[in-house]
Amino acid sequence: MNLHVLIMDDDKRITIELQEYLQRQDFEVDIANDAETGLAKIIKHKPDILFLDIMLGEANGLEVLERLKKQYPKLEVIMITGHGDMDTVIEAMRLGAFDFLKKPFKQIEAKIAIGRTSKFILMQQELQKYQEQNSLISLELENKLEREFIGESRHIKNVLDNAVNVAGYEVNVLITGESGTGKEIISRIIHYSSNRKRKSFFPINCSAIPETLMESIFFGHKKGSFTGADEDRKGIFELADGGTLFLDEIADMPVELQSKLLRVIEEKKFRRIGMEKDIASDVRIVAATNHDLDEAIKRGSFRLDLYHRLNTMVINIPPLRQRREDIKPLVNHFLHQFCHKNGRIVPQISDEAMQLLNSYDFPGNVRELKNLIERALILAKGSVLTAENFPVCGQGVALQLQEPESYNLEDNETRLIKAALVKTAGNQTQAAELLGISRHTLIRRLERWRVSES
């Protein structure tokens, strides 16, 4: 590190000798034998380190120090004193001096002092660089998240306002809404708008974790505590300490684990599998579900006490069919996003295609719309997207006109899963994509409702 040093001392012999010595140590060095010259060089060159004599001719070195630290707080000062008066030394340190040397001092003592100061400057520079990088990352991520949550409707603006407002309060949040509405994006907005934004954000899909591994994944385990536990392992609650834990599809969490989650929320501590010692946990919970938790509580598949711990603040994201004014801005957003990503010219979308999209119910919500736009761009042969590029929407318009046999959510969920599996000839991955859910979620649904794939 090539630091710039200024020596301010009215003793010319000391300044010249110290200058020559420090230059041999690869420092860039200026000298000044009075306060006026020294201040002018500070303004012009902005040195990193200043050697400052307590008695600087007619000027008082302590007064110069006080003035400089106010104007240049990052300038590190090593005081030079010919008296060794401890009160003067203490006052100099109080005013912001980093170190001091007592006359007469050896050159090696000056080298040691400047070495300590250099390390401190380097540490401060690295810390500032880290903070600036993280601030830029956080700001960029926050802006990106808000840009991803597109919409002009009153409903969606209320959702965004509620997310930003609740972020400033240390409370748990429950986000409800159908699959594909953007629950994880809202959870990230809450995290990155809160005081926890410099800590970890852990998204966990409760339906994607095998039930036998859930406790270990959440709380960790001790080596040898069960077959396959070959080493000590931290759980999510330990890794996410100080941050936010997003529990997606919370309704799919087994009841037994729900009781352990409740204990962590209430007592702010947990215990690894195989350990007897509690570990403190400072984690904010943001949970999400696309199920009716009231119905789950009645069935006995979800704990009422856990529900009350999670729903301090409830944010409901309406499905896309209830806010059709958001479809057009979302279409434009995804068109520009995919074209920019793939280096393509953004095509126009025909009035007929836009009308088709506006009339479609989007059972997979925003996630489905995003997939439809990407598929249409791949299939499109010209510079205009037409209705033919959205064949699923055409089928969807016909289907949505049929009166359902039942308005029960569970009955319709089963029917849709069967229909998706029939349409994809039993391919679970493709069926899950049609439904706007993950394959793991589909498997869990099949297990829960015992849906036949035939």
Image: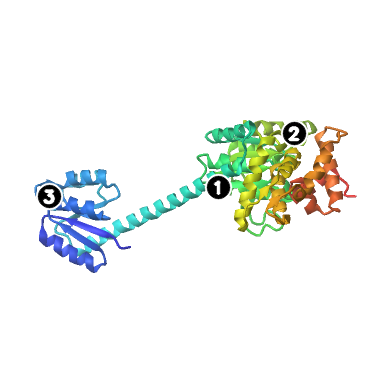
Element under label 1? loop
Element under label 2? loop
Quarter residue 180 falls in: top right
Numbered mark located on residue 55 in the image? 3
Query: In the image, is 202 to the left or to the right of 227?
Result: left
- Mark 2 is surrounded, within 10 Å at the Cα level, by few (under 14), some (14 to 19) or many (20 or more) other residues, namely few
Gap between marks 1 and 3, in whole Å? 52 Å
Type of residue at label 1?
Answer: Ser
The tag earlier along the polypeptide, 3 or 2, is: 3
Gap between marks 3 and 2, in whole Å? 78 Å
Colour scheme in use: rainbow
* Residue sitting nearer the eye, 100 or 68: 68
Numbered mark located on residue 200 in the image? 1
Q: Where is residue 335 in the image (x, y as percent from the top left)?
A: 64, 49
The tag earlier along the polypeptide, 1 or 3, is: 3
Residue at (66% x, 44% y) in the render: 331
* Residue sitting nearer the eye, 1 or 403: 403
Q: Position of residue 164 (x, y in %)?
A: 55, 35
Q: Where is residue 110 in the image (x, y as percent from the top left)?
A: 22, 60
